[in-house]
């Protein structure tokens, strides 16, 4: 593959989350020159070398509809040198990416990631105007194929080689402190985990969990009176270094298009119980590592199983990491994406 292409990636919010982490890995593995446009400074602009920080009007705002988006794109285009393709990192970035590409008269690609995306969103954010769409998750791909004749390819998430590591030590017994990964958004399932703890307190009060740390804010609703401490630490910038304080994690999400967080934890050497959402399924993970989403009862039972069979469940971690590497090493998963960038850049 040649390296004549130069891609401009557009990502409005620079805070660390799934889309931003995915983009940082993609850019780190790119064979092409890259430049990233963000609206503010933050985690992503600090993680990447070549960035432009400049606020643009919200695509649905009155200033944008009165020409503000086009004026911003035209002004920015004068600062861009030899860009051959523009990439929007989700549907919210599509209007500005298209406006910039139009000013430069170059192709435009979108990565569509949001699991709950509707046809109204697809049309409102002009997703059908792209030269190529890369879509995360089979469910979203199926919907968009019904809405559009634009060329569509799966977008397969991947991990850098540096992210694969073994656990630093083996804890002899089920830990008394647990990490719950996600956020306070209802679809991330914090309330399901709390309900599972309530069940355990009634049915197995001696399970030994003393503290649960959530990577998010307190969810809506009143918290129950539990014997263990619940700590809500908010958004964690250095996620994996923070997570390595724990020997066990849970990802109780109700819905994911891919589901990066639990796999990130596993390849970092942290056994993780997760819901069967996104890519997490029995082809990839042992049955004891999986639970159905939105089921506090199943989650409570699985926690009991891990407490009783800690050593045997945990011993499967090396094989889990091997399978994730085999399927999701970014050198493999990004190949089609970069080939499309090369093809469109050569044709423009």
Image (tube, helix red, strand yellow):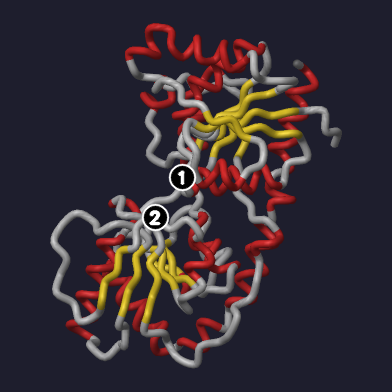
Q: Is residue 132 visible?
A: no
Residue shown at the point (72%, 39%) measured from the top left = 336
- Residue in front for this viewpoint, 35 or 206: 35
Residue 26, given in percent of the width and then of the height, sits at: 65, 44
- Position of the C terminus, as image quadrant, is top right
- Residue in front for this viewpoint, 312 or 234: 234
Q: Residues within 10 Å of mark 2 (few under 14, many from 20)?
A: some
| Residue furthest to the right | 2
Circle 1 — which element? loop
- Position of the N terminus, as image quadrant, is top right
Q: Are marks 1 and 2 in contact (CB under 8 Å)?
A: yes
221 relative position to 244: left or right: left
- Residue in front for this viewpoint, 184 or 336: 184
Residue shown at the point (43%, 7%) measured from the top left = 67
Residue 11, given in percent of the width and then of the height, sits at: 52, 34
Disc with the residue nearer the chain's start (1 vs 2)? 1
Residue behind mark 2: 235
Circle 2 — which element? loop
Residue behind mark 1: 15
312 relative position to 275: left or right: right
Q: In the image, is residue 88 above or below residue 171?
A: above
Q: Is residue 240 visible?
A: yes
Res. 46 image quadrant: top right
Q: Residues within 10 Å of mark 1 (few under 14, many from 20)?
A: some
Residue shown at the point (38%, 67%) measured from the top left = 180
- Residue in front for this viewpoint, 59 or 147: 59
Q: Which mark is residue 305?
A: none
For the residues labelled 1 and 2, the Cα–Cα distance comes to: 9 Å
Residue shown at the point (48%, 53%) measured from the top left = 278
């Amino acid at each position: 593959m040649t390296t004549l292409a130069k891609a401009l990636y557009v990502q409005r919010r620079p805070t660390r989350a799934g889309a931003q982490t995915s983009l940082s890995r993609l850019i780190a593995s790119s064979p092409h020159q890259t430049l990233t446009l963000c609206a503010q400074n933050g985690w992503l602009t600090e993680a990447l070398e070549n960035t432009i920080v400049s606020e643009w009007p919200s695509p649905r705002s009155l200033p944008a509809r009165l020409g503000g988006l086009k004026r911003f794109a035209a002004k920015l285009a004068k600062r861009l040198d030899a860009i051959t393709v523009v990439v929007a990192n989700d549907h919210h970035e599509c209007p500005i990416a298209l406006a910039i590409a139009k000013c430069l008269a170059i192709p435009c690609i979108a990565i569509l990631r949001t699991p709950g995306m509707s046809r109204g969103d697809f049309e409102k954010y002009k997703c059908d105007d792209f030269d190529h769409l890369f879509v995360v998750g089979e469910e979203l791909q199926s919907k968009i194929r019904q809405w559009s004749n634009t060329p569509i390819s799966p977008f397969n998430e991947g991990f850098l080689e540096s992210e694969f590591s073994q656990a630093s030590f083996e804890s002899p017994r089920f830990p008394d402190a647990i990490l719950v990964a996600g956020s306070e958004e209802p679809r991330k399932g914090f309330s399901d985990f709390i309900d599972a703890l309530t069940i355990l307190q009634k049915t197995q009060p001696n399970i030994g969990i003393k503290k649960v740390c959530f990577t998010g804010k307190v969810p809506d609703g009143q918290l129950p009176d539990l014997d263990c401490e619940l700590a809500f630490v908010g958004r964690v910038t250095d996620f994996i270094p923070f997570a390595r304080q724990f020997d066990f994690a849970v990802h109780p999400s109700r819905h994911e298009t891919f589901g990066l967080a639990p796999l990130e934890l596993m390849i970092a050497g942290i056994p993780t119980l997760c819901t069967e959402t996104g890519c997490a399924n029995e082809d990839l993970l042992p049955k004891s590592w999986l639970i159905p989403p939105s089921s506090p009862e199943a989650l409570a039972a699985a926690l009991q199983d891990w407490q009783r069979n800690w050593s045997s469940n945990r011993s499967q971690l090396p094989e889990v990491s091997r399978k994730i590497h085999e399927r999701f090493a970014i050198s493999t998963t990004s190949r089609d994406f970069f080939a499309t960038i090369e093809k469109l850049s050569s044709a423009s």
